[in-house]
Amino acid sequence: MVSSAAATDRAALVKAFDESHTGVRGLVESGVSTVPDIFRHPDPYASIPLAPPGVSIPVVDLSLPAPLAAEAAAAGARDWGFFYLVNYHALVPSDYPDRLLAAVRAFNELPALERAAHYGRSRDGGVNYYSNVDLYRSGAASWRDTIQIIFGPSRADAERIPAVCRAEILEWDVHATAVARALMALLCEGLGLGADTLEETSCLEGKVMVCHYYPVCPEPERTMGIVPHTDPGVLTVLAQDGIGGLQVKHTNEDGESYWVDAKPVPGALVINVGDLLQIMSNDKYKSVEHRVVMNSHEEARVSSAIFFNPGKRGDSVFYGPLPDLVSSGNPPKYRNFIMSEFLEAFFKRDLSSKALIEHFKI
């Protein structure tokens, strides 16, 4: 049990780090040779083994005929909660998402004073640069910095996005939304629903982009890039560079769980099911835990995720299992709720585990 004095000391260290306004990148720039105590995770990689060789998350080819692509996407969402997406460039220019990732790297490698001008935790204005969304709630901080942009339902002022990456972020929002629209249609078809069901439920209208930067780490075995967690929304579209570190928790048919490396695949996006889609599908699709591990690379890792959520809000707009997916033989597994309740539950906790989805189980 942590003593009150130790907790006070930790709180002071967290506050001092946050008020430096330069993030984890600032620690690296200062020449740290060890991971500071507030970032140390107790035995972070000991609980679940790594997958045996040859195990990989599935691949969905968007150039396949729609019925085959829908079948593959549904299988990936049902059995893994994750899949690679390839051959999507009919929807996306060939130089994306690489241009986006390069621009995000350029921002994070600006001089400290230039970055610090953008740092802050207030969600007013819709654009934030910060380190660890749950910095003050988690037991240990993670080794990453983030630019967050809210694209819906209320859209951020584009002028607040750092100039060095503004054009690329705005363009990627358009392209990733086109990808998400196509995937939601396939996933609806995989459930036997009309292709527009999720879009008509406003699931493309709530959008948050987070661009993560994982600086080089002096002791990668002591900390994590992101702790094991599930994404809260409907669908996540992730672009990652070639450094690697993302791992997905998978339980096989024998009930054995292990971490599977989601290694960077040239030209592939990574797609995953969020908690809301698990709820809306009444457990036909699964959100699964994933994490980012640190490694000994001498180059920082960069990724960008867009979380798609329902955009219709208000006290009279309820979400829960989709009506066409429940029956007397398959009753709802979750209660209905409004988005403000869902978001309040999310922001009250730290990122780890699937505690959020458990909050709404019947």
Image: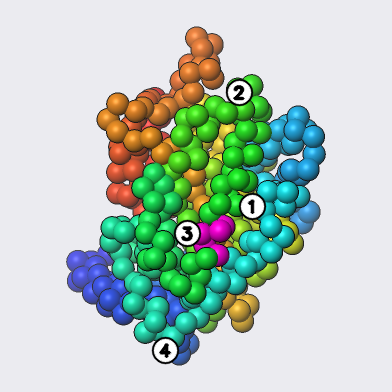
Q: Secondary structure at mark 4?
A: loop
- For disc 1, the neighbor class at 10 Å (few under 14, some 14 to 19, many from 20) is many
Q: Is residue 4 magenta?
A: no
Q: Nearer the viewer, residue 57 or 124?
A: 124
Q: Tag 2 or tag 3, which sits nearer the N-term? A: 2
Q: Which residue is mark 1?
A: 270
- Asked whether, in this view, residue 207 is left or right of residue 58, the answer is left
Q: Secondary structure at mark 3?
A: strand
- Up-down relation of residue 182 to residue 36 (above or below): above
Q: Tag 1 or tag 4, which sits nearer the N-term? A: 4
The residue drawn where x is 35% and y is 78% is 116
Task: Name the amino acid, label 3.
Answer: Val
Magenta segment boundaries in residue numbering? 168-172
- What percent of the width, then of the height, locates residue 26? 41, 82
- Asked whether, in this view, residue 119 is left or right of residue 7, the answer is right
- Up-down relation of residue 257 to residue 329 (above or below): below
The mark lying in front, picked from 3 and 2, is 2
Q: Which residue is mark 2?
A: 194
Q: Secondary structure at mark 2?
A: loop
> In the image as oriented, which residue stretches furthest toward the top?
328
Task: Name the amino acid, label 2.
Answer: Gly
